[in-house]
Amino acid sequence: MSGVTLKMSGEYKWGRLVKLVRESFVIIVYVTEQMEPPVFTQKPKNKDVKEGAKAKFEAKVKGKPLPEITWFRAEEKLEATETVKLTTSEVQGHVETSVIFDNCSLADAADIKVVATNPAGEESCGATLTVQIKKEKPAFLKKPDDTEVVEQEDARFETTVTAKPEPTVEWFRGDKLLEPSEHIVYEKEGETTP
């Protein structure tokens, strides 16, 4: 038999007549599908998004049998969550797959990898997710209060400021910048600048 196809699987009988004795044989032919390792026909592309935005990575892969798909962020296997959506479907002999990150945060920024596996082999490809900080102008959550002190005592002024990226806070007396010295100490949550 040459050019065997899947349709040719089955039972075959062979016989012969020798000196008026009929001999027959049954042969069963099992034809299995030719295996092909996974090959990506569309690879995910790098994404650069702002904090809070959505990022979608897509890939298409073929192989026989159709490969199983696994997505990774850095080396961590991704599972579907409220903010991570995974889809995989068979379309015209290919596997189409995607991962969507809703409401991206800086923690989502990483290398994203998709792995396709079947009995004939494994193939992987990846892209990078970059998340840009959503800029917010500085806002005072707590303004410094007026302070009355006795001569030779220490005076302390406190403020709380929020912004993205983190702001630099400077203190002034009138128009003169107060530089850190032995008399002026700047403190920032966990840091002290003499």
Image (cartoon, helix red, strand yellow):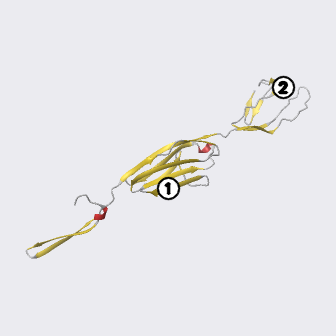
Q: Is residue 153 above or below residue 107?
A: above
| Residue under pointer 2 | 173
147, 152: nearer the viewer? 147
Q: Residues within 10 Å of mark 2 (few under 14, many from 20)?
A: few
Which residue is drawn at the image coordinates 17% and 72% (left, top)?
24
- Which disc number belongs to residue 57? none
Is 90 situated left or right of 33 in this image?
right
Residue 145 screen position, x and y as percent: 86, 35
- Which disc number belongs to residue 88? 1
Residue 179 screen position, x and y as percent: 77, 24
Determine whether label 2 and label 1 are within 8 Å by CB.
no
Q: Which quadrant: the C terminus?
A: top right
Q: Is residue 84 above or below residue 48?
A: below
Is 167 situated left or right of 86 in this image?
right
Residue 148 screen position, x and y as percent: 91, 32
- In this view, which residue lies farthest toward the front? 92
Viewer-side label of 2, 1? 1
Q: Is residue 42 above or below residue 90?
A: above
Of marks 2 and 1, which one's residue comes earlier in the chain? Answer: 1
Is 109 situated left or right of 70 in this image?
right
The amino acid sitting under disc 2 is Arg
Q: Quadrant of residue 22?
A: bottom left
The amino acid sitting under disc 1 is Thr
Which residue is drawn at the image coordinates 46% and 57% (left, top)?
90
52, 141: nearer the viewer? 52
Which residue is drawn at the image coordinates 56% and 50% (left, top)?
100
